[in-house]
């Protein structure tokens, strides 16, 4: 950029110096030649020389400094355009990917919903089976308790019946056996016992 400014300043200085030297040359020309036709020839000559010098200066400056500046500038613009194109391609690829994901999102949500419903159904079935098994265990336990309670009640009833029967038998034996019969029974028992001891 600084080089371009320097080149521009140099060109302006050269043009100024050419115009500066042109005025004394025109003034130094002989008066006889200052006719309209001759004056225009001199002016045309100086303008042509000025144009050629100016064009040569511009070409020289372009070749020397301008080409590098414009090449660098065009490379920068080309790189910027390429980066912009790549950024556009990346953003378009991301957009396409996002649209694809959004399109697949409904299917994914539907699949997740179906999976959740299937898991809920499986869990309900597992809970139902576990409840049935628990109910079966409780039923078996209750039946075992009932059988045990029934058996215990039967045993208590038998004991009670035996006790009542013994009580009634004692009562009847007491009624039938008075003191005299009691002495006879004790006598029979002792005699029986003595005979057993003698035989041994």
Image: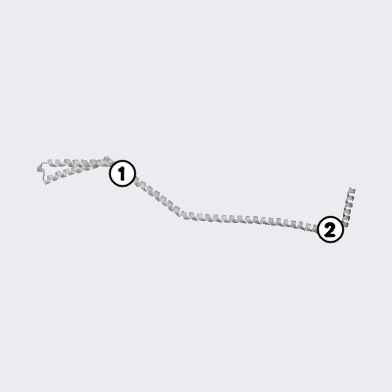
Give the crowd class for mark 1: few <14, some 14-19, many >=20 residues within 10 Å.
few
- What kind of element bears circle 1? helix
Does 80 sit left or right of 51 as displayed?
Answer: right
Q: Nearer the viewer, residue 139 or 146?
A: 146
Tell me the quarter of the picture where residue 4 sits: top left
Q: Quadrant location of the N terminus? A: top left
Q: How far apart, in angstroms, are the residues tagged by discs 2 and 1?
A: 143 Å
Disc number at residue 26?
none
- What kind of element bears circle 2? helix
Which residue is labeled 1 in the image?
73
Which residue is labeled 2 in the image?
174
Give the crowd class for mark 2: few <14, some 14-19, many >=20 residues within 10 Å.
few
Q: Position of residue 25 (x, y in %)?
A: 14, 41
Q: Nearer the viewer, residue 66 or 186?
A: 186
Q: Position of residue 123 (x, y in %)?
A: 57, 55
Q: Is residue 56 visible?
A: no
In the rendered image, the residue lying farthest to the front is 179
Does 60 sit left or right of 125 as displayed?
Answer: left
Quick check: 76 above or below 123? Answer: above
Q: Position of residue 157 (x, y in %)?
A: 75, 58
Q: Is residue 197 visible?
A: yes
Q: Nearer the viewer, residue 138 or 167?
A: 167
């Amino acid at each position: 950029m600084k080089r371009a400014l320097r080149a521009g300043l140099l060109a302006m200085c050269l043009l100024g110096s050419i115009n500066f030297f042109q005025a004394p040359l025109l003034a130094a020309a002989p008066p006889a030649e200052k006719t309209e036709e001759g004056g225009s020839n001199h002016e045309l000559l100086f303008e042509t020389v000025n144009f050629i010098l100016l064009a040569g200066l511009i070409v020289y400056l372009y070749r020397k400094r301008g080409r590098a500046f414009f090449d660098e500038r065009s490379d920068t613009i080309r790189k910027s355009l390429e980066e912009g194109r790549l950024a556009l391609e990346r953003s378009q690829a991301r957009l396409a990917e996002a649209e694809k994901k959004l399109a697949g999102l409904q299917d994914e949500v539907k699949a997740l919903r179906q999976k959740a419903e299937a898991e809920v159904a499986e869990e309900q079935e597992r809970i139902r089976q576990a409840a049935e098994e628990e109910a079966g265990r409780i039923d078996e336990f209750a039946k075992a308790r009932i059988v045990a309670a029934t058996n215990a009640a039967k045993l208590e009833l038998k004991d009670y019946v035996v006790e009542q029967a013994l009580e009634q038998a004692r009562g009847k034996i007491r009624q039938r056996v008075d003191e005299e019969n009691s002495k006879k029974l004790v006598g029979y028992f002792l005699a029986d016992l003595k005979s057993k001891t003698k035989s041994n």
